[in-house]
Image (cartoon, coloured by chain):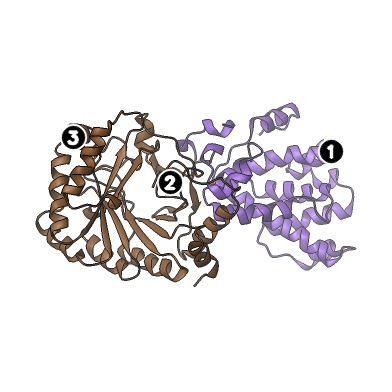
Amino acid sequence: MGWMSGISVGDRPVTLITAAEAPLLARPYFADGDPGPIIAALAQVPEMLEVVAPFLGVVLGPSALDLRTKEVVILRTSARASCRYCVEAHTVVALDSGLSDDEVRALRGELGVEDAFPAEADRAVIAWCDALVGTGSVDAACRDRLRQGRPDHVVVELTLLATTTLLLNRFCTALELPTAPDVLARLAAAGMAS
Amino acid sequence: MSTAIAEAVADGRLPGRVWLYANYHCNLVCTYCLTDSSPKSPRRDLAADRMVDLAVQARALGFTDLGVTGGEPFLRPDMVDVLLAMAEQLPTVVLSNATLFHGDRLTRVETLAGQPVTIQVSLDYADAEDNDAQRGDDNHATVVAAISRLVERGIRVRVGTTLDPDAEVSDDEQARLCALHRSLGVADEDHVVRPIVRRGRADVADVGVRATVADLPPELTVTADGAWWSPFGPTIRDGVPETDMLITRTTDPLVTPATALLRLIDGRPPGDDAHLGIR
């Protein structure tokens, strides 16, 4: 029984499945312990879980993009989409991936991007995320900044990462997914609690 | 025809019967009910056309038999028509408490005579006192009379006996139950005895054997809430279907849960199969 087992269904939109309740197709995701609330929610529809979870793993996990850039995209997109769960979770991941306190605060919208990110390469990625979270329509100048020196496959992956993050932002916000206690403790220690 | 499903049924890896939960409400409140059924239970009906369509799909996939359970299926006014349509596809067994077979409902049930439909009636003990303690006042007398009426009308009847594994049932009492069903025209091969499974209300009442997927035959079971490993899977606890034996929420097309079930079966280690005799 993990920390989510104490959360009653009356407290949130859906029941988060525990290891003891895991449907048959979902059991592998619980085999190594608490899989987190996204998987625990998806386990309500196991045939979706077994497709979505690997998809998320590929898009958000190690890939041709470096980890730091991926966390810039995920945290910035989540902050612009006002996803409490994703911002809290990925603030910790961003710090662990080598982003500075000021960079993380800037991605969260607490400091200016221009101050924290001197490199145009980073600023172009952040502007791309901001555009995607907005109307989804990207103007030519923003597109040209992103494409500067980047091959097509990188542009595609950055875009897929941002839009997949946006999907998760809406999912986690709508279902009011809870942040793990250890993450909240890390945020408090870093002075970045919500 | 899905070759993989048909082959798995033919070689015995996948049981041939598909179970459908017609509903979850019941006129009885049995002490060990897996589905926590009662007159006040949410119905969770499978629509009549949906049940018939599932029967069509089951046959096309290569399944060989159908089962209908609940709740008490015959609380539904359309149940006999549904069974007749399902039986046009595959032989069908329907589980019933047999307390409703009189008057107009009995007249409707009579049309099942001569059709490939078997009614499996619950009768737990030879002695009314023991039986009625689990299934309600006057249940024994009502069911015995109903079995006679069904058999007289040419309807095939099976008797399903569910026993508390911790209760000491003497050989004499078991023999008297078998003598009773024989006297009613139900042959030994149509008498099924299984233990109470500790799920749903039985778990709350602290009775029955604990059963996992390793203990239960993988009989594809469809309810209004999804597809399960076994008819013992979609039990109700605190008003919510338990998910530990859930396969998929998708039930249409039927090939989706059937294929997923087959993957689960093929992924089991050798020897990891049913051994508690629960059926």
- Residue B220 screen position, x and y as percent: 45, 56
Q: Are marks 2 and 1 on the same chain?
A: no
Disc nearer the start of the sequence (3/2): 3
- Residue B193 screen position, x and y as percent: 32, 43
Give whichever of A104, A25 is nearer the camera. Answer: A25
Q: Is residue A7 left or right of residue B189?
A: right
> For the point 42% across and 54% down, which residue is it?
B221
> For the point 21% across and 32% down, which residue is it?
B130
Q: Are marks 3 and 2 on the same chain?
A: yes
Dot 2 surroundings within 10 Å: few (below 14), some, or many (20 or more)?
Answer: many
* Tag 1 residue: A100
Q: CA distance from mark 3 to mark 1?
A: 78 Å
Q: Amino acid at mark 1?
A: Ser
Residue A130 can be seen in this image:
no
Disc 2 + disc 1, Cβ < 8 Å:
no
Q: Amino acid at mark 3?
A: Asp
The residue mark sitting in front, 3 or 1, is 3
**Which subunit holds the residue at mark 3?**
B
Give whichever of A155, B73 is nearer the camera. Answer: B73
- Residue B260 screen position, x and y as percent: 54, 57
> For the point 76% across and 45% down, which residue is it?
A107
Dot 3 surroundings within 10 Å: few (below 14), some, or many (20 or more)?
Answer: some
Q: Of the numbered discs in the image, which one, if any, rests on residue B233? A: 2
- Residue B21 screen position, x and y as percent: 35, 54
Q: Colour of chain B?
A: brown
Dot 1 surroundings within 10 Å: few (below 14), some, or many (20 or more)?
Answer: few
Q: Quadrant of residue A34?
A: top right
Q: Amino acid at mark 2?
A: Gly
* Tag 3 residue: B127
The residue mark sitting in front, 2 or 1, is 2
